[in-house]
Amino acid sequence: MKEEIIEQCNAPRFRDLNPYEIVALLLNEGQYFASVRTFYRVLKERDLLHHRSNSRARSRHAKPPERIATASNQVYTWDITYMARTVKGLFFYAYVISDIFDKSIVGWAVHEEESGSHSRDLFDRTLQGKKVKLKALHADNGGPMKGITLMALLRELKVDVSHSRPRTSNDNPFIESLFKTMKYRVNYPGRFEGLSEARLWMAEFVHWYNTEHLHSTIGYVTPEQMRTGQAEEIFEQRNRTMRHAQATNPERWGSRSVKHWNVVREVVLNPDKKE
C-alpha cells in the first residue's frame, strides 16, 4: 500500500498537488488507497513531505521578543510614514522614534526619500553619540530599518534590535497609534507643497504631541509630564480631589469605589503570552 501511495503522489498529474487534493481526485475516479492522514504519514516516512508547487512556500516568522520598559530611555520603537505631496504619487517620508514608556517622540526627521543613511543620522542625533544607554529598539521590517550603517551603530552601542513580522502591524502598535494620531490631527493638511512645509508642520506636531497631547495610555497626562516625573504629582492631586469629592458628597458614590490614578510603572511591547 505504501508503494502505491508513493507512486500516486509522484505521478505527473499529482506531483504538484497535496494529499487532500490527490485523495479527492482519486475518489472522483472511484479509487481509494488510504486516508489523507495516511498519505501524509507515508510521505513523511520517505522524507517526501515538501512544498509541491512552483508557488513560493508560505514562510513562518517568529513573533518578535517581548520588550519591557520600566523607565524612559530603555526601549524605543520607530517607523517611517508617508506624507503625501501635492503632486499625485509623490511623498515625503517622516522618520519617527518614540519611547514606549513615556510615549514621547524622542527623534524625528522628514526627507524626500527612504534611506539607511538618513536612519543612521537620526539615531546618531537621538542617542547623542553614546549618552543615551538604550537597551532595546523595535522597528518595522523595511530596508531603512535594517540598513548596514544603522545596524552597525546600534551594535556598537549594544542595543538589542528586533523587527516586526511582514505585514503584521500589531507587532509595532505604539508607533502605529502615534501615526494615526498624526494623520487624524485636525490641522493635518493631507498634502504638502514642499519639504520645508512638511518639516515645519512635523515640528509643530511633535511639540504639540509631547507637551500638550493628553495621552490615554499613560493616564491623560502629556508625554513630557510622564518623562519628567510630573505625572506623579498630577495623579496625587487628582486623587486628593477625588477623595475630597467623595467625603463631601458620599451619596454620589454609594457603594462604588473612588477611582484612583496611578503612574504607569511598566510598559510591555509584544507581551509573551504564556498559557
Image: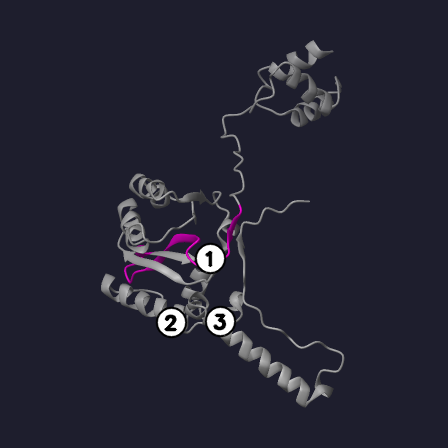
**Segment tinted magenta in the rendering:** 66-94
| As drawn, 236 above or below 206 | below
Instruction: Assess whether residue 242 is covered by the magenta stretch.
Output: no
Quadrant where the C terminus sits is top right
Badge 3 crowding class, 10 Å Cα cut-off, few under 14, some 14 to 19, many 20 or more, is many
Type of the residue with mark 3: Ala
Q: Which of 82 and 249 lies nearest the eye of the viewer? A: 249
Q: Residue furthest top?
A: 3
The image position of residue 261, as x and y in percent, is 58, 72
Any part of residue 189 in sight: no
Give the distance between the C-alpha atoms of the residues marked 2 and 3, in whole angstroms: 17 Å
Mark 2 lies on residue: 208
Give the distance between the C-alpha atoms of the residues marked 2 and 1, in whole angstroms: 18 Å
Question: Is residue 264 shown left or right of residue 141?
Answer: right
Residue under the point 42% across and 53% down? 76
Type of the residue with mark 2: Trp
Badge 1 crowding class, 10 Å Cα cut-off, few under 14, some 14 to 19, many 20 or more, is many
Mark 3 lies on residue: 231
Mark 1 lies on residue: 100
Q: Which of 129 and 89 lies nearest the eye of the viewer? A: 129
Give the distance between the C-alpha atoms of the residues marked 3 and 1, in whole angstroms: 16 Å
Instruction: Assess whether residue 68 is covered by the magenta stretch.
Output: yes
